[in-house]
């Protein structure tokens, strides 16, 4: 067996891709900082009891687990950073007011989230804790739109749903937990015949509402249609008002899907996915998840989003790489050392050519060189 082969769906990032991802990571963290989000860096692994708290079963199967040799307890390699950030807000910062946090790091999945995806995505995101109103949902959506804009992706769009629409309908009809789970699965698959079969024992108004959900997909006009086709329930009406507010704030095209129940056992309100040209799967996911704070023993409303940085960077407009400047090794030449330092301070890449490797010069990708003209070091075009 070749010892240098990596596991399936695990791969190295070579210089061009790594540089593209790192530029985007820096730009986004700078963006988040300007909006008042403070950076946190949770550990790569922690006890499973904490890592999966409040996430239901959504992350359990995606999490690699191992036994801690020091304590004997089960530990997990994080499959999502968001629950860790919620733990930090709940038990380490312990603030009473609004907290804005951001993060960036690797996560690990037992299986690819979508076909041919990496099992080691790079996740970057931003979260707001301590505010339950639509204003914080509006803020994170505006921030996501700005992040997609600075990435330079084409055909960006956001799909928005609200889990309270389905939840309000089934709870008002006193649907049992088992049937609720079956209806949830059918709606996730957009299985209209399945929803029809499962809802036959329910009242006509409830059944009609459930059958309508998969058809309520499209632009903002869908929300007006939903008001006429769905029951006049307080929870449903509040969800539709929130969605209307969100439709007016995004700087990219928005569509609505009232049967979108991703993270149903994790999210508590708005859910949204960000897409861009060149990538079939969502590059960003987010929404409101107020119940996670309760699971950590400190109820804190929360909303935010995470971005698959690697997928987004692959779809982003490629920046023209800067060609380095080739320089001789300074070897005590003070003027040459100063010239090199001045160029680097100005943002230039300067590579000192080590002796004996002149024949490999082309591999460095340099287009200019430092030459000594009359005792002064100047940059000139490199002759090949």
Image: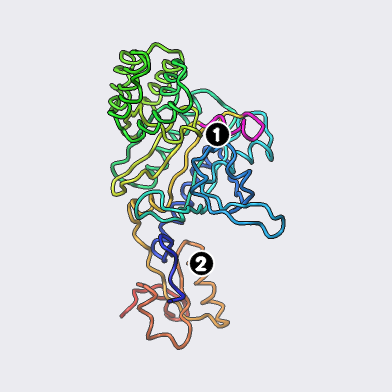
Residue 31 image offset from top left, x and y in percent: 48, 43
Q: Is residue 267 above or below residue 69?
A: above
Q: Is residue 39 left or right of residue 210?
A: right
Q: Position of residue 78 (x, y in %)?
A: 55, 50
Instruction: Out of 151 and 66, give the one closest to the viewer.
Output: 66
Residue 68 numbered tag: none
Give the side of residue 148 with respect to residue 72, left or right: left
- Tell me residue 238's x, y (percent): 44, 17
The residue labelled by disc 2 is 342
Q: Residue furthest right?
A: 71
Residue at image point 61% right, 32% down: 293
What residue sits 59% from the left and 45% below the top? 51
> Is 296 contained in the magenta span?
yes
Please report the bounds of the magenta region as a residue range. Answer: 289-299
Q: Nearer the viewer, mark 2 or mark 1?
A: 1
Residue position for label 1:
128
Quadrant containing the C terminus is: bottom left
Q: Quadrant of the N terminus?
A: bottom left
Distance from the alpha carbon under mark 2 to that under mark 1: 42 Å
């Amino acid at each position: 067996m070749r010892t240098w082969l990596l596991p399936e769906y695990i791969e190295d990032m070579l210089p061009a891709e790594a540089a593209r991802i790192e530029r985007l990571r820096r730009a986004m963290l700078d963006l988040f900082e300007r909006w008042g989000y403070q950076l946190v860096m949770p550990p790569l692994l922690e006890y499973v009891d904490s890592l999966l708290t409040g996430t239901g079963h959504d992350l359990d199967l995606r999490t690699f687990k191992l036994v801690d040799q020091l304590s004997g307890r089960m530990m997990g390699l994080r499959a999502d950073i968001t629950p860790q950030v919620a733990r930090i807000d709940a038990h380490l910062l312990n603030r009473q007011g609004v907290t804005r946090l951001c993060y960036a790091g690797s996560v690990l999945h037992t299986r690819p989230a979508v076909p041919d995806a990496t099992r080691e995505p790079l996740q970057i995101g931003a979260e707001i804790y301590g505010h339950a109103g639509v204003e914080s949902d509006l803020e994170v959506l505006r921030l996501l739109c700005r992040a997609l804009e600075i990435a330079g992706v084409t055909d960006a769009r956001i799909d928005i749903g609200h889990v309270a629409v389905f939840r309000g309908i089934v709870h008002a009809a006193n649907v049992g937990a088992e049937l609720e789970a079956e209806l949830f699965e059918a709606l996730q698959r957009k299985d209209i015949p399945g929803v029809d079969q499962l809802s036959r024992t329910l009242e006509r108004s409830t059944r009609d509402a459930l059958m309508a959900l998969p058809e309520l997909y499209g632009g903002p006009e869908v929300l007006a249609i939903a008001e006429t086709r769905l029951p006049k329930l307080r929870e449903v009406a509040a969800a539709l008002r929130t969605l209307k507010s969100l439709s007016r704030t995004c700087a990219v095209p928005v569509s609505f899907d009232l049967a979108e129940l991703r993270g149903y056992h994790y999210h508590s309100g708005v859910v949204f996915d960000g897409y861009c040209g060149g990538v079939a799967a969502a590059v960003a996911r987010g929404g409101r998840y107020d119940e996670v704070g309760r699971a950590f023993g400190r109820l804190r409303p929360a909303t935010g989003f995470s971005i698959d940085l690697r997928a987004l960077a692959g779809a982003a407009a490629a920046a023209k790489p800067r060609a380095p400047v080739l320089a001789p090794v300074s070897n005590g030449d003070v003027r040459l050392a100063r010239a090199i330092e001045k160029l680097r301070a100005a943002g230039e890449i300067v590579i000192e050519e080590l002796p004996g490797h002149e024949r490999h010069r082309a591999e460095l990708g340099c287009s200019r060189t430092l030459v000594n003209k009359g005792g002064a070091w100047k940059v000139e075009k490199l002759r090949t």
